[in-house]
Image (tube, rainbow, N blue to C red):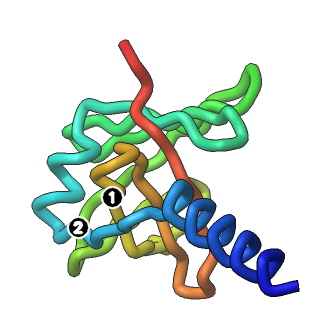
Amino acid sequence: MGKKIIVAGLFSVICSTAFAQDWKPLNAEGIVAALSERALVYEDGERQTFRESGRTTYSVGAGDSQGSWRAEGDQYCSNWPPAMTWSCYAFEWDAESGRLRFVSASGDVTVGTYVKE
């Protein structure tokens, strides 16, 4: 019985280390630097391109949606017409994996990686 507990504990430590992520919030300047003239692919395969001008294109299947983005108060914010309001998200980066994530006020998380050109 004691060996099973030790093995289970060791397995737990190994797994948590292997999947550990160190998400760091980026400030407005870091958000702009991370996204300007870059593209991300999300875990569901959808893609988003960010232009320095503040324009963004979200590609889903065969369709594209045009919107706007900006960094405001150390958050990533976007607007997708015909909506008039902006939605803002905490923006974080994991240096080890190179992944980026957007976290909504309600806690929803979207994770993306840079598209390799």
Whether label 2 touches label 1, CB < 8 Å: yes
Helix, strand or loop at label 1? It is strand
Q: Write down the residue under mark 1.
A: 93
Residue closer to the observer: 54 or 89: 89
| Residue 39 on image: x %, y % | 40, 31
Q: Can residue 114 be seen by looking at this rendering?
A: yes
Q: CA distance from mark 2 to mark 1?
A: 7 Å
At 25% from the left and 31% from the top, the residue drawn is 37
The furthest residue to the left: 29
Residue closer to the observer: 108 or 49: 108
In what quadrant of the picture does the N terminus appear?
bottom right
Helix, strand or loop at label 2? It is loop
At 65% from the left and 43% from the top, the residue drawn is 43
Lateral position of residue 96 relative to residue 44, left or right:
left
At 28% from the left and 59% from the top, the residue drawn is 70
At 59% from the left and 42% from the top, the residue drawn is 42
Q: Amino acid at mark 2?
A: Leu
Write down the quadrant of residue 92 in the picture. bottom left
| Residue 29 on image: x %, y % | 11, 61
Q: Disc number at residue 113?
A: none
Of the numbered discs 2 and 1, the one sitting upstream in the chain is 2
Q: Is residue 96 above or below residue 109?
A: above
Lateral position of residue 26 relative to residue 114, left or right:
left
Write down the quadrant of residue 114 in the picture. top left
Q: Amino acid at mark 1?
A: Trp
In what quadrant of the picture does the C terminus appear?
top left
The furthest residue to the right: 1
Q: Write down the residue under mark 2.
A: 26
Lateral position of residue 80 relative to residue 92, left or right:
right
